[in-house]
Amino acid sequence: MQIEHYLFINSSPLEKLISFLLYPISLLYASISLIKRIILSLFKIKYDIAIISIGNISLGGSGKTPFLISLIKRLNLQNTAIILRGYKRKSKGLVIVNHNNNILCDSKTSGDEAMLYATSLKQSIVIVSENRINGINKAKEMGAKYIFLDDGFSKSNIEKYDILLESNDIKNKRLFPSGAMREFSFVKKQANLILQENIDYKRKVKIPKIEKDTILITSISKPYRLDSFLNKEIKKIYFPDHSLFSKEDIVNICQEHNSNSILCTTKDYVKLKDLNLEYKIFTIDLDIQISDDVFMEIQGYINHQSSINN
């Protein structure tokens, strides 16, 4: 039984039984998260610059990274900074990933999402830090006027504009570990905007023209979402979400499947390119189209904050 299938779909009798048995643990987990949220909110820090958080209350795969990339490009602001945890990176503490169009570390140090931000938004400061307060202070010190937090909804000690993304493919909406939800659903009321996939924002996927022996290699959450865009004959290798690739693994996979070319997402590419592979690499282009009404709401918040702070 694949853990991702269990968490998000939870359709088989066995999965439903396990979900039921885990429910008491789920209530405990969510209650601890709620208590933490309440305590942190008592010590909220207010900053004199616009801070926007993109988050969700489900596990993985809601499109936060491509949404934020599309949003920042469309806003076309100067002096922006992106701060995120840097999930599964091989480093600790605060690391500056990108500054003044200079990438200052590799993808193992930054994590795949931070490196994707750095390569997609070259004029933005990109910082990874488990402590978002430290990240915000560093970004301000470096001249940032607009700060974006990736996965910052749970950081209730920070005064910010919260945008929650809700994926449309989660069938198992029980609390983790019974299901895919990290917090009680009523905490969504604390968000400034709750956006529904395929209504408020839509994914636009472009598959490049690939060679016959190409193999798909990816480590994204919910890789099955790519199936509808791909030829049914293509071979697929799915790694766990955010996995780091080794050159030996990729070479062995390509040799085993007699493949001379690889298809991957842009988030996978920032890790694969560091391996100096001798294979052709084709990338799937994912863009997020944000509705005009949503964009104008976000733009309105930024304009309001700018008028207050200036």
Image: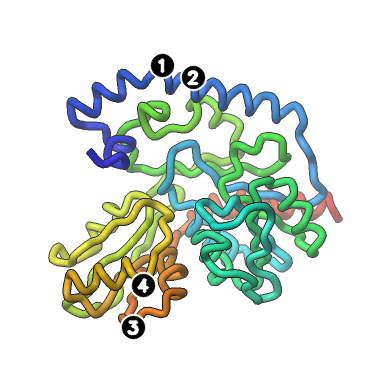
- Front: mark 1 or 4: 1
Q: Amino acid at mark 3?
A: Glu
Residue 227: image location, x then y, percent: 23, 57
Mark 3 or mark 2: whose residue is earlier in sequence: 2
Above/below status of 30 relative to 213: above
Residue 195: image location, x then y, percent: 48, 43
Instruction: Find numbered disc 3 in the image and state the secondary structure of the residue it sits on.
Output: loop
Above/below status of 72 relative to 26: below
Spatial CA distance of label 4 from label 3 is: 16 Å
Write down the residue under mark 4. 283
- Front: mark 2 or 4: 2
Q: Is residue 103 left or right of residue 306?
A: left
Spatial CA distance of label 3 from label 2 is: 49 Å
Residue 293: image location, x then y, percent: 53, 51
- The foreground one among 204 and 184 is 184
Write down the residue under mark 1. 24
Mark 1 or mark 4: whose residue is earlier in sequence: 1
Write down the residue under mark 3. 278
Mark 3 or mark 1: whose residue is earlier in sequence: 1
Most extreme residue toward the left is 233
Q: Residue at x 50, y 24 (%)?
A: 30
- Front: mark 3 or 1: 3
Quadrant location of residue 162?
Answer: top right
Q: Are marks 2 and 1 in contact (CB under 8 Å)?
A: yes
Q: Amino acid at mark 2?
A: Leu
Q: Is residue 280 left or right of residue 273?
A: left
Instruction: Find numbered disc 2 in the image and state the secondary structure of the residue it sits on.
Output: helix
Q: Is residue 121 left or right of residue 195?
A: right
Spatial CA distance of label 1 from label 4 is: 43 Å
